[in-house]
Amino acid sequence: MRIDVLTIFPDYLAPLRLSLVGKAHEAGILDLRVHDLREWTTDRHRTVDDTPFGGGAGMVMRPDVWGAALDDVLTPDAHLLLPTPSGEVFAQPTAHALAHETHLVIACGRYEGIDARVAEHYRAAGVRVSELSLGDYVLNGGEVAALVVVEAVARLLPGVVGNPESLVEESHGEAGLLEYPVFTKPPSWRGLDVPDVLLSGHHARIARWRRDEALRRTAARRPDMLSALDPGVLDARDRDV
Ligand code: SAM
């Protein structure tokens, strides 16, 4: 998969050279390219923004600079992602869908955002454009959103996470539940003991305990997820939890 990130702060994306995403890049699983939007400016001051039509506070990113950059970077298969607090909230199903793409282009806004004609123009030109929000709060720029989207998508690519089984039972996975609590050595720490069942070696009982805990945790923390579950995926014992 190829991912291009366009930003006025390329250094913000430096963490993508670390850890599993960095290794995926080195291994050729992920072709990650970070671009400085100012490379596409034409004036002495390398200007990317201007005052908003209609007045008001702040500055807006110019469509001509974004257009020049995106014309160069978009390929016929590219899916253009525009981080914005007014977009659809980015969640695991979107990460899974994006992991099947061959080319993502992430355009990081700053100031009051990118001139609205950029999204409109590329949609009209037949480019798939998704406006994605990390959540109901406002950040200073789209770089943090780019970090989140790249990491969430890249870890789903084959070969990125060492043991693909660790992707199966995660929170927000196919089961539609939060993950059960996890423990490691030592078995007793500061007066707190690991649940006996996890030390029993009894695989069926461990699986049942984990399922019960996942259901309890989801009910307590994310009742919305529990009510969204298809009742058909619940077994008789689930209903007792
Ligand atoms: N004026 C905009 C509004 O109220 O919707 C907010 C602009 S914000 C200060 C600047 C940039 O940060 C946005 O263009 C976007 O790229 C990014 N951004 C801010 N909050 C975000 C969020 N919750 N999710 C994704 N991107 C966000």
Image: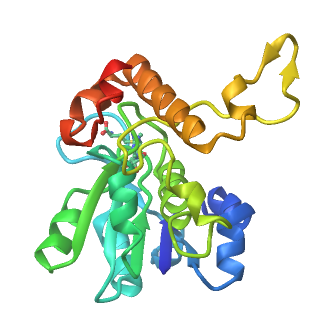
View extreme (top): residue:
191
Measured from the top left, where is residue 6 in percent x and y? Answer: 48, 68
Measured from the top left, where is residue 138 in percent x and y? Answer: 41, 34
Quadrant containing the C terminus is: top left
Is residue 61 visible to us here? no
Of the pair 131 and 235, the residue shown nearer to us: 235
The quadrant where residue 239 appears = top left
Seen in the image, is 44 located left or right of residue 176? right
Seen in the image, is 91 located left or right of residue 53? right
Of the pair 147 and 222, the residue shown nearer to us: 222
View extreme (bottom): residue:
76
Name the quadrant where ligand 1 sits. top left
Seen in the image, is 218 located left or right of residue 62? right
Q: Which residue is drawn at 65% across and 64% down?
A: 163
The quadrant where residue 147 appears = bottom right
Of the pair 100 and 122, the residue shown nearer to us: 100
Of the pair 203 and 185, the residue shown nearer to us: 203
Is residue 142 visible to us here? yes
Color theme of the render? rainbow
Measured from the top left, where is residue 198 in percent x and y? Answer: 69, 33
Q: Residue at x 84, y 27 (%)?
A: 187
21 up-or-down from 206: above or below: below
